[in-house]
Image (spheres, rainbow, N blue to C red):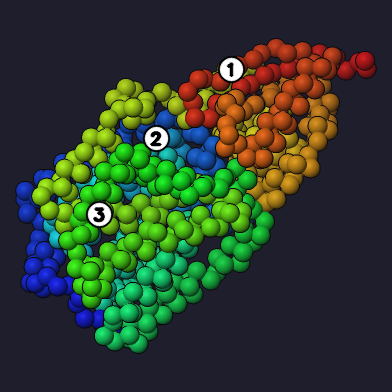
Amino acid sequence: MTLAAAPERDPRPPTRIHADRARGLRRSEAVALAVIVLLAAALRLEGIGTWYWIDESLSVGLARHNLYEIPSLLLRDGSPPLWYLLLHGWMLLFGTSAVATHALSFVFALLTVPAAWYLGRRLFDDRAAWFAATLAAVNPFVTYFARETRMYSLVVLLALVVAATFIEAFVDGRQRAAWWFGGSLLALVYTHNWGLYTAVACAAAIVPIAATAPDRKALLRRAAIVFGGVGLAYLPWLPALLSQVQNTGAPWSFTPTARGVVRELAALFRDERTLGVLALATGVGLLSFDRRLRSRDTLAVVCLGVIVAGPVLIGWVLAHVEPSWATRYLAVVAGPLVLLVALAVSRARGGVGVAAVALAAILVLQPITRINSGLPLPRDAKSNARALAERMVPRLTDGDLVIVAQPEAVPLVHGEMGEGFVYADPMGVVEDPTIVDWRDAEARLRASSLGDVMGLVDALEPGQRVLLVLPANAEADTDTSWIELFRLAGQRTMRALNGDDHFELVARLGGAEGSYVTLDALVWERVTNEPE
């Protein structure tokens, strides 16, 4: 069965569109694009190799396992497998250091820039392409995740391709683009679960296209084939997804207010000032569009708007059912949003678009935080776990007990301290300290008691030591019950050890100020087995 092509809907002269798509890259354009890519690289190289924080250690811990084990281990985590499989192969080639694993995210983040330029030109014209490349290059969200061993720079790139190929496949009716759309969408849903929200949004975006399609049946048949193919290819993972939905969760997550959603979206462009500048220029640009849906570019704008707004709305609604929101999940809309803004500002008259993007770039690049400044980034900006390990490992011997009050920090501490110790959290011994079991995690933590760890402590022989790792970040209004529970569990264990005459406090380390994840550490030594 072949995919029927829908007629072009662009009110501009077709020769202009085809000329932009068909001609090669001029030398001057190649130089300009290279300069923008180098700017993006300069921004994203800062911070490469900084020590891991919790989520990165979870990525590395999972990816260290055998390839065939990763999908089953993810039943405890709640994520799809593609990113971890890619990271596994990458680490086999380049190693497991922070520099090596950050490089994978850096590559995807850097590819976003030429991809935005190329897709902007294919979809629209040269002017939109340059705006898209510039916005992708200075985007602080992409820059941040270029130096994290997480999947979010890949998600941005895939979502960008999904949005662009959707326009080509269903607005322009290009048969080959339909398969590119299906492939990129499949990769997205296998990379992050919010990709499913993008899939729903794309399906919803078929509605305005169908409203004006000359051959509605052919359009719907084409959409059914492509979305059905993606669904069939996702079917093998569906049982795992259902198990994750039923048994795992994000107890650390929060539910944003409507006002909070605006702040979260502003974070994609740094802050609300930058979002305001770009939103104003986008509004001015949209005024120049033909308001009829039969206009090809108007229909493209509507579809991009649905692809951007859909995941945000779905995520926000579901977060009220069960907390499942995080700013980083908005990676699924960052790419489509770049295309939408680039198209709109490219149509703004009177230099409004150029001025807005220039001002936005200045605001983004203005150094107000240490991470985005020209100053060297401290190695422990994300976490002081490495410094903790360097200080505490020499004070311990094989078989000593390491209790980490925050369960999801166990892989981070284990990754820095290494093998040879018995690792535990408030629920008892952690059999595999490279991963976190999120299945019914909050219920299990709530049901835990002091005896779950003190039984392990009491089994130590004289001369053996116990290291207690406590969360040291300041309490915040956004702290969830999960965070409150492990804080209380850590304090409970500390008081019990301080009050036990069998143990003597021999070392203490306060966390480095300014780290995103700050940990305190205390070491006790068992001095006697005699009863009180």
**Circle 1: is it few (<14), some (14-19), or many (20+) Cα within 10 Å?**
some
Res. 321 image quadrant: bottom right
Res. 363 image quadrant: top left
Percent across and percent down for residue 159 are 36, 58
For label 3, the SS is helix
Q: Quadrant of the N terminus?
A: bottom left
Report the residue marked by disc 2.
Answer: 99
For label 2, the SS is helix
What is the CA distance from the residue labelled 3 to the residue labelled 2? 41 Å
Taking 207 as reference, is 58 left or right?
right
Res. 178 image quadrant: bottom left
Mark 2 against mark 1, which lies toward the viewer?
A: 1
**Mark 3 / mark 1, whichever is N-terminal:** 3
Amino acid on which disc 2 is placed: Val
Percent across and percent down for residue 60 are 51, 42
Residue occupying image coordinates x 43% and y 51%: 330
Mark 3 against mark 1, which lies toward the viewer?
A: 3
Residue occupying image coordinates x 49% and y 30%: 516
Amino acid on which disc 1 is placed: Gly
Q: Is residue 393 visible?
A: no
Disc marking residue 398: none
Taking 213 as reference, is 47 left or right?
right
In the depicted structure, whether residue 195 falls above or below residue 371: below
Report the residue marked by disc 3.
Answer: 283
- Whether pointer 3 and pointer 2 mark residues with C-beta atoms closer than 8 Å, the reply is no
Residue occupying image coordinates x 49% and y 75%: 232
Taking 361 as reference, is 393 left or right?
right
Residue occupying image coordinates x 42% and y 74%: 227
Q: Quadrant of the C terminus?
A: top right
Q: Is residue 453 visible?
A: yes
